Amino acid sequence: MPISSDDLAALSRTSLDDYLKNTPVDQVTQDQPFLNRLLQGKKPFGGAKQYIKENIRKSHDSNFKWTYGEEKITFKKRDTVEQTEFPWRRCVDSIYRSDDELFSNGIRVVRGDGGKVRLEKNEKVQLIDQLNEDQLTLRTGFFEQLNLHCLRDGTSSTDAIVGLDGIVTLTPTTGTLGNIDRTTAKYWRNTAVTAIAPADLVDKMEYAWRQCVRYAGGQAPDFILAGADFIDAYRKCLTLTQNVDAGRVKRLDASTGEGNKTGLFFKGKEIIWDPTFDVLDDLDKPETKWAKRCYFLNMRNISWREDGYDIFSPDAPHDTLCLYTAVSMRCVLSCNRANSHAVLALA
């Protein structure tokens, strides 16, 4: 028996809703570590007129001085607070299948008086298999693109959010971030060390790390993300000492780590390889390759907010017989302490 267009739309929405809710975020860990880390610490987003705003302390504006005897005390009204503005945006992804395409797969869609028709059990299984394939590609594509834009600087589209490359930039003395001008606001600049020679790599990492700790109130970065070229250069800086146990069969392995966990550490934090960096190099052809970069991030000072998934099936146009399904989400990536992060890049 056929299925009504209304029942088909409801089934598609329910299938995608279950697919998104029941698929653990951990499944994107190996391929999209930055997005996964953001989603782990996501904050609720109840709505805002246009921006997410956060108050930040830009200075102590101290009026400290030494006095003696009858020297007068001077008083000063302090100006210590600035307000960031990060615009939220909506991202969407969608799919459609024509009625004839479904019919070719054994599913007949009825758009008139549909309440009187129901699928047989075997037809429902066949339809669910078809929908599951659509939901898989929709979900995978949605998170794939979301991850790319969370890493980019936000200039790829007028409606894109500011991503990592905009928050922790290679050029921190120019441009604006959160509506604060970095050309004048020195407190709003991340550390950037570029054109690093492999022989100087560890020294430059020490410098960048200390700068992050210095401006983060003693808090060290808690997440290190790097590209393949940077990881290879760092690995060559290390000397591995082998302890030989004469009483046992020897097993030697020149590699370290597993998956995107490199097994390489700096200051006790494991360096995570992000394969998306290679994708961005192929897509955007940046002057400084992503594969040559390493990010020291203090995730306490980066916030991901979203309002959850809105899944819906728009009505088909009067002259088109198709099933439409879409997922939509409002989100924003913000920062409240830019100088607690650093980016390094090889020459």
Image (tube, rainbow, N blue to C red):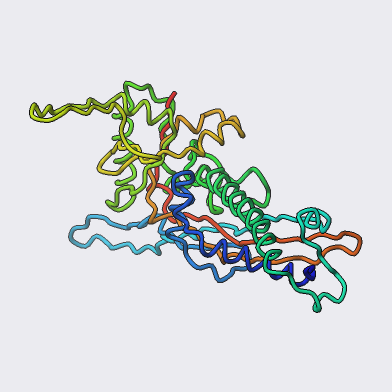
| Residue 295 in view, yes or no | no
Residue at 43% from the left image edge and 43% from the top image edge: 190
Is 139 on the left or on the right of 249, as rendered?
A: right
Residue at 30% from the left image edge and 46% from the top image edge: 213
> Residue 295's quadrant in the figure?
top left
113 relative to 146, above or below: below
Residue at 77% from the left image edge and 72% from the top image edge: 6
Quadrant in which the N terminus appears: bottom right
As drawn, the residue found furthest toward the right would be 319
Is 304 on the left or on the right of 234, as rendered?
A: right
Quadrant in which the C terminus appears: top left
Is 278 on the left or on the right of 298, as rendered?
A: right
314 relative to 288, above or below: below
134 relative to 212, above or below: below
Front residue of 230 and 344:
230
318 relative to 268, above or below: below
Rendering coords of residue 251 (x, y %): 22, 28
Front residue of 2 and 158:
2
| Residue 325 in view, yes or no | yes
Rendering coords of residue 239 (x, y %): 23, 25
Rendering coords of residue 192 (x, y %): 42, 36
Is 262 on the left or on the right of 15, as rendered?
A: left
